[in-house]
């Protein structure tokens, strides 16, 4: 069992080890001193606004969806949680109502909750990879909010830490079951609509793998580890109705969506020392185990001017924990202990692994694009090198977009440039033939950059306001200190005097114009035509290393004159594929910095069988005829495999010094003839 997930023991007094609610935005920014801002965050995140109105946060905090609870959560866990929420999850924001519920009343409430059943069907997975789920958890952004697994080998430079600000997880194995957890991870917003657990762009199998990791599965077959949910007992209609009456009296619908109950009218706070903040358990009010600093901050907030707070962007970003990944105006960003878990393309510096700042985001991004990003549209993700996923907030994207635009609104964002830019000058400036060399670092559509692989700039006009683009070009470091992006017009002056008379404004306008309306690509990309870089063996065999489907990342391709070709897997030390006809097109291998797996250029490839053994690849040499001789080791003994083509057949000669013949496998659907000799064997492969 993974005790790191947040299960903790109760003290002898009956109170949980950490009874106070844990609100990350408050603990990170406000716990050191009593403040109005801290109280405002607590007022939102403890759900106070749900009963008392006027949330200072744009998206109000709410409780989870309670529909189908009996199909997702163990009854014993719910029962214990109702007695003491902090015993179910350390730092839970759910207030205790145990003082207002007798054991009999709690049974009635459970009966009511069991009736909220629509009989959902959760997909059954045939395979689960907990190790892959661990990689997802620790690389895709989960550690921004939740502590890493104790036995996970942290990335380089990670510091020992107990991750004090991490949002704890309950003992998931005691709370839920595999299929329900996978369904939750696939679409969290269906269960928690307030965005505090945002929607991550996970494939269904990724959600399955992540669930397997969180439940500490030891097998790839979910049936081996997954225990079914214990059935909730059947209850009488009278019990259900009595439970509904209790839920209505406790105003559960203020925080939770319940199909047959409505929240009570907003309750005005007249006495900040009474009610929920009084600590008096003799009254039927929610009870929070607040620390003294939390209580004081709440009371200070309740006496403050709410209109001023509504204009404070910090509250929403802190409450929704956007600051776990993003910085705005110098506030927030990854913490010291979580920073090393943000990984990506190291060649791009911190920009290649850390999410971008939110400073001025409302004047940077066009509204429609921002709305797409916030809704979870992965087509709007322009930084594929970041491992951390940008989550979505379905149902809230439009509200958040309108709010961010209002915060950063600036007149004239789309008025620049005043004059239409010169398209051909823009093409030249973007390129490497007398330009500012943008394509050295940036991709252009499907064309990879010539150097490091920064984001695609071919469609910036769809994302960015033109005036923001202009301001950024003049001083990139003012937006993102430490960026690798240079100031191409330092002090507003051009470094390219022979284009548009060295006029910086006209040059930037030309670049923008070509991005928006230009055809073709910037100058400087290789003049590639299909087939121009096809390798055609003529008089001698040709050898090329690459990534190849069916052969892997250590593929050694051999093309023989006459149209017989071989792929040897340098990782496993075994031949992988053989095919006839055309050999290989090397364009991507030679010019694309991060290539995908390539395919043979010829006809159908025939795969060799794989041998599960400890063959070790030690390199290769080329004989006088240009034929490859692969140097291998098996069982502590060295041997060689030489490949040649003779009379339209592929010859594979295996020689060894002593002992048994090394293991070998052969291609399927290919005729194989064996010729043996002392410490040697030759296999002749032919096609009918």
Image (tube, rainbow, N blue to C red):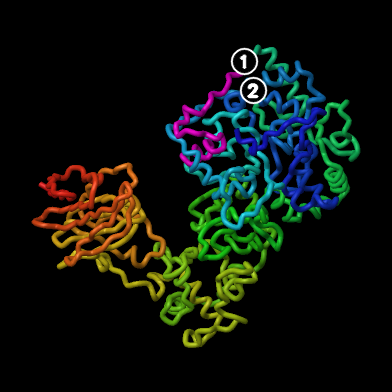
Kindly state the secondary structure of the residue where label 1 is placed: loop
Instruction: Please state if 77 lies on the left or on the right of 12 as rendered.
Output: left
Q: CA distance from mark 2 to mark 1?
A: 9 Å
Q: Examine the image and state in which quarter residue 401 appears.
A: bottom right
Q: Which mark is residue 204?
A: none
- Quarter of the N terminus within the rendering: top right
How many numbered badges does the structure rendering display?
2
Could you tell me residue 631's position as x and y percent? Answer: 28, 57
Towards the viewer: 535 or 473 = 535
Residue located farthest toward the left when viewing the structure as drawn: 647
Rendered view: 346 above or below 501: above
- Residue 228 within the magenta-colored segment of the rendering: yes
Residue pictured at 65% horizontal, 27% vertical: 259
Residue 368 seen? no
Residue pictured at 67% horizontal, 40% vertical: 168
Q: Examine the image and state in which quarter residue 627 appears.
A: bottom left
Residue pictured at 69% horizontal, 14% vertical: 239
Towards the viewer: 433 or 505 = 433
Q: Examine the image and state in which quarter residue 77 appears.
A: top right
Mark 2 surroundings: few (<14), some (14-19) or many (≥20) residues within 10 A: many
- Tag 2 residue: 75
Could you tell me residue 416's position as x and y percent? Answer: 57, 73
Towards the viewer: 571 or 87 = 571
Mark 1 surroundings: few (<14), some (14-19) or many (≥20) residues within 10 A: few
- Tag 1 residue: 233
Q: Are marks 2 and 1 in contact (CB under 8 Å)?
A: yes
Towards the viewer: 239 or 132 = 132
Could you tell me residue 324's position as x and y percent? Answer: 66, 52
- Residue 542 within the magenta-colored segment of the rendering: no
**Residue span colored magenta:** 205-233
């Amino acid at each position: 069992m993974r005790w790191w997930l947040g299960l903790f023991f109760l003290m002898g007094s009956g109170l949980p080890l950490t009874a106070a609610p844990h609100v990350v935005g408050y603990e990170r920014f406000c716990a050191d001193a009593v403040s109005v801002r801290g109280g405002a965050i607590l007022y939102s995140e403890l759900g106070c606004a749900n009963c008392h109105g006027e949330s200072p946060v744009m998206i109000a905090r709410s409780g989870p969806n309670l529909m189908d609870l009996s199909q997702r959560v163990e009854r014993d866990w719910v029962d214990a949680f109702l007695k003491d929420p902090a015993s179910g999850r350390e730092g839970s924001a759910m207030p205790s109502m145990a003082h207002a519920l007798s054991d009999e009343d709690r049974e009635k409430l459970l009966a009511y909750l069991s009736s909220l059943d629509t009989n959902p069907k959760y997909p059954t997975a045939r395979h689960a990879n907990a190790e892959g789920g661990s990689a997802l958890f620790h690389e895709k952004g989960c550690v921004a909010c939740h502590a890493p697994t104790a036995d996970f080998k942290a990335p380089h430079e990670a510091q020992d830490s107990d991750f004090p600000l991490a949002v704890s997880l309950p003992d998931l194995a005691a709370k839920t079951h595999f299929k329900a957890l996978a369904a939750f991870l696939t679409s969290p917003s269906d269960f928690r609509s307030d965005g505090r657990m945002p929607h991550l762009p996970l494939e269904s199998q990724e959600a399955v793998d992540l669930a397997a990791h969180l439940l500490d599965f030891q097998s790839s077959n979910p049936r081996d580890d997954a225990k079914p949910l214990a059935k909730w007992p059947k209850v009488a209609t009278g019990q259900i109705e009595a439970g509904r009456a209790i839920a209505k009296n406790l105003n559960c619908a203020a925080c939770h969506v319940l199909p047959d109950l409505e929240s009570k009218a907003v309750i005005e706070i007249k006495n900040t020392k009474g009610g929920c903040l009084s600590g008096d358990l003799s009254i039927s009010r929610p009870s929070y185990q607040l620390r003294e600093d939390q209580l004081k901050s709440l009371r200070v907030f309740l006496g403050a001017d709410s209109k001023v707070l509504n204009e404070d962007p910090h509250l929403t970003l802190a409450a929704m924990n956007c600051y776990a990944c993003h910085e705005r105006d110098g506030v927030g960003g990854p913490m010291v202990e979580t920073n090393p878990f943000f990984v990506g393309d190291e060649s791009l510096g911190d920009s290649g692994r850390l999410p971008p700042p939110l400073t001025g985001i409302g004047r940077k991004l066009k509204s429609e694009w921002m709305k797409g990003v916030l809704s979870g549209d992965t087509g709007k993700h322009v930084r594929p090198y970041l491992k951390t996923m940008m989550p979505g907030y379905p149902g809230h994207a439009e509200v958040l977009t309108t709010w961010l635009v209002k915060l950063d609104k600036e007149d004239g964002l789309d008025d620049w440039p005043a004059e239409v830019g010169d398209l051909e000058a823009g093409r030249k400036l973007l390129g490497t033939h007398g330009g500012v060399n943008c394509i050295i670092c940036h991709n252009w559509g499907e064309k990879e950059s010539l150097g490091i692989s920064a984001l695609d700039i071919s469609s910036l006009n769809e994302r960015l306001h033109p005036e923001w683009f202009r301001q950024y070009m003049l001083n990139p470091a003012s937006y993102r200190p430490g960026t690798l992006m240079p100031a191409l017009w330092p002090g507003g002056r051009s470094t390219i005097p022979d284009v548009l008379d060295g006029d910086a404004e006209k040059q930037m306008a030309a670049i923008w114009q070509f991005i928006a309306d230009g055809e073709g690509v910037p100058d400087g990309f290789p003049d590639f035509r299909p087939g121009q870089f096809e390798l055609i063996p003529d008089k001698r065999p040709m050898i090329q290393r690459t990534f190849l489907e069916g052969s892997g990342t250590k593929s050694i391709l051999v093309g023989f004159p006459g149209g017989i070709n071989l792929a040897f897997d340098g990782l496993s030390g075994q031949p992988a594929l053989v095919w006839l006809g055309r050999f290989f097109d090397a364009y991507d291998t030679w010019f694309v910095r991060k290539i995908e797996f390539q395919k043979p250029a010829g006809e159908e490839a025939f795969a060799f069988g794989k041998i599960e053994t400890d063959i070790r690849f030690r390199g290769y040499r080329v004989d006088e005829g240009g034929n490859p001789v692969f140097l291998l080791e098996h069982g502590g003994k060295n041997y060689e495999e030489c490949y040649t083509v003779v009379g339209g057949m592929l010859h594979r000669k295996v020689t060894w010094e002593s002992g048994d013949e090394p293991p070998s496998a052969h291609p399927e659907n290919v005729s194989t003839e064996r010729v043996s000799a002392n410490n040697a064997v030759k296999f002749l492969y032919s096609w009918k």
